[in-house]
Amino acid sequence: MKQFRPVRGHRLAARGLPGSPVARLVAALAALVAGLAVVLVPGTATAAPVCKVDYTTNQWPGGFTASVRLTNLGSAVSGWTLRWTADTGQQITNAWSAQVSQSGTSVTATNVAWNGSLATGGVADFGFQGTWSGSLTTPSDWSLNGVPCGGVSSPSPSPSPSPSPSPTVDHSPSPSPSPSPTVDHSPSPSPSPSPSPSPSPSPSPSVTPTPSGCSGTGLVVCSGFEDQSGTPSGEWQVTTPNCSGTGTATIDTATVHSGGKSLRINGGGNYCNHIFAATTKNVSGIAPVVYGRMWVRHTTALPATHVSMITMSDSRDGGRDLRIGGQNGALQWNRESDDATLPEQSPSGVALSSPLPVNRWVCLRFQIDTTQQAMRTYLDDQEIAGLRVDGTPTTDVDAQWLRRSTAPRPTTLRLGWESYGSDSDTIWYDDVALGSSPIGC
């Protein structure tokens, strides 16, 4: 039995003698295991959302348009790519204000040259048209530049409780080894969340908002009619192109969008009942794109017959008018020289436009490229798909409009009413702006 004593002696050294090499080794290994437990047991912390997407559709049997507003909630970006999954039966056919491609149900939208830079809180608007069958649901898996809009799970150090001593570890009162300076055994604080964005995101750098009272700079036309009274005068002149009737143009103090005054047009019915207030500012120098914005309010829904409310002389079309009005209950552009309309007045074309809401103020914006056939129109900052010209003829939209290849060159701006039938309306205009840079609502 003597041959077993050395083994028993070593066991006693390991278990009972604090100064032995084996005891020190075991204690060090225990500390290392505890440190590894801290490092290798992750918790989760949800990152702040990086974007918000507002998605609205206008649909009809077999077709739809979608308006998308992307708000950047993360760090500023100089270019963006938004991805999402479409329903199985959806197919995108064209888009505006973004490059949109589709592979199966995977859709990718990438910025165009003028709306790629988004500050924190910056906004980019774009839209697309497509066909659908089966279902048309709102996407829920948006991602911006590869990161899900709702944020992602990322590892965060979160130590587990210290492990119970192993039965093989020395229980005698030996000195505890000093903790390694690279391992922190205290609970790690949760990362501070990124500051929440302002509830009202600042506009995209591609849009320079003009205050509602129209006190912005760099605009050729900028009027809230605050310097007017009675009958328009000075910067605004009453005019009745072609012929006149019972319509009137006055300055109103009872119904306003901002400030204390607005332009009121009482538009009479019957053919050739024209009444307008025209700016005396030189609009012909605005280039290369003419941007317009105005707040509009009216009392009577757009009729089935043709009416006009905003006209601009086109120097490249013999001075004939480029007109914004309505027909078949929806907004339209009309060209006086050949009576071309945008959109075409087919059921599908009219469905791509929009009524002009009654009895409330609406922000109407448009842009006219004077270097090529390209136009955009927005209602309350939502682009109207049927009022878009992009140089490529689209059936029911701009195929008729593009029969004339020359881009328009507006030289005047008139606000009022032209009735070509028995229709009448009362319209107010306020906070009107025209210039060479984008103008916000």
Image: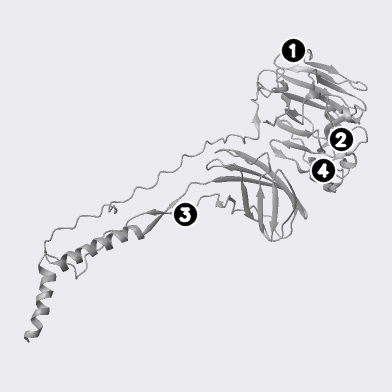
Mark 1 or 4: in front is 4
| Mark 1 touches mark 2? (CB < 8 Å) | no
Q: Position of residue 10 (x, y in %)?
A: 12, 75
Mark sitting earlier along the chain (1/4): 1
Three-letter residue code for mark 3: Ser
Q: Give the image quarter of residue 133.
A: bottom right
Return the mark for residue 256: none
Return the mark for residue 153: 3
Mark 1 or 2: in front is 2
Q: Give the image quarter of residue 304.
A: top right
Per the image, label 3 sits on a secondary structure element best described as strand
Three-letter residue code for mark 1: Ser
Mark 3 or 1: in front is 3
Is residue 414 toward the left or the right of residue 75 in the image?
right
Mark sitting earlier along the chain (4/3): 3
Three-letter residue code for mark 2: Asn
Q: Position of residue 263 (x, y in %)?
A: 75, 20
Q: Work out whether residue 241 can be spotted.
A: yes
Q: Which residue is mark 1?
A: 229
Quick one: 34 or 294, which is closer to the camera? 34
Q: Which residue is mark 4?
A: 391
Mark 2 or 3: in front is 3
